[in-house]
Image (cartoon, helix red, strand yellow):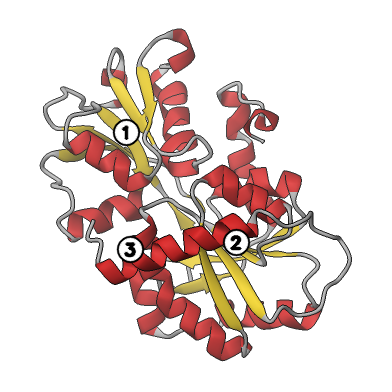
Amino acid sequence: MPRPTRLATAAIAVTTAFTFVLSGCGASSEATTAPETLRVALLPDENASEVIKNNEPLKEYLEKELALDVELVATTDYSSMIEAMARGRIDLGYFGPLSYVLAQEKADIEPFAALQEVEGEDPTYQAVFIANADSGIEDLADVAGKTVAWGDQASTSSHLIPKAMLAEEADLRVDQGDYEEQYVGSHDAVALAVQNANADAGGMSLPIYERMVEEGLIDSETVVKVQESDPYANYPWTMQSNLPEDLKEKLRAAFLELDDPEVLEPFGAAGFAEVADSDYDQVRDLAPLLDIDLEDYQ
């Protein structure tokens, strides 16, 4: 992906800031006063400069609506973001469904909004299983004996969902030696690994796949879609439960009433819709299918 110098520099700055974020003490369950600067952690599902670029318009919008400074924090990986949220060093966090479930086990946080791709529809998204066109993979059963690239271990759409698709629909399991796997860190890294034939196949977010094709970062003739998943509750925006109630209400309103095309355009979304913890039970239910103990991910 393009990495303009200004954005790359910003990425280094927020990643450095994150080192200090992790150094704080644990979170308190007691209500707090409103922070002078709202610390917002962003899921590292793509390279840091792309994550920052996509969220800059939202940052400016929140500063205006909340009358607070907003600091974007690009975490190094999923686990470090979960840990920062658990320690109370982050006020707002943008998680994937699985990483939210894991964070919720350790932190007193609550989901309140998720991207809505089409106005009036549920805030859901899909994963997609992809393959290199020369791999010979035309359906999930063809993955037997191949190499599969995943993103982060705690990723929903670039690990948990597509791995469950292989197990449930093709009876292929990595722990039985049916295929080999490798973790490459992020969705865009999965797509590039498949395009460059460093992996035969992989799993990733369908919206990220479509955006990479649209931007010419991958070739849809080389990186082909094998199968899309069922819809799942979209990435949740979460907040610390001990934030002042008036600030929490302002945050909900800022997201749920957002209709500025310039802010929404980087996400390819119509707006945000309300979500609750129970919306992510669908992700929790995948764990037994793969004999996964969620405690192992902590």
Q: Amino acid at mark 2?
A: Gly
Tag in front: 1 or 2: 2
Q: Is residue 238 visible?
A: yes
Gap between marks 1 and 2, in whole Å? 26 Å
Residue lying at the far right of the rendered structure:
30
Q: CA distance from mark 2 to mark 3?
A: 21 Å
- What is the residue that sits farthest to the top in this orientation? 176
Of residues 200 and 36, the one nearer the viewer is: 36
Q: Which residue is mark 2?
A: 93
Q: Is residue 26 left or right of residue 45?
A: right
User: Which residue position holds label 3?
Assistant: 8
Q: Is residue 55 left or right of residue 190?
A: right
Q: Residue at x 42, y 50 (%)?
A: 45
Q: Nearer the viewer, residue 58 or 231?
A: 58
Does 233 appear above or below 37?
above
Q: Residue at x 18, y 53 (%)?
A: 217
Mark toward the start of the polypeptide (1 vs 2): 2
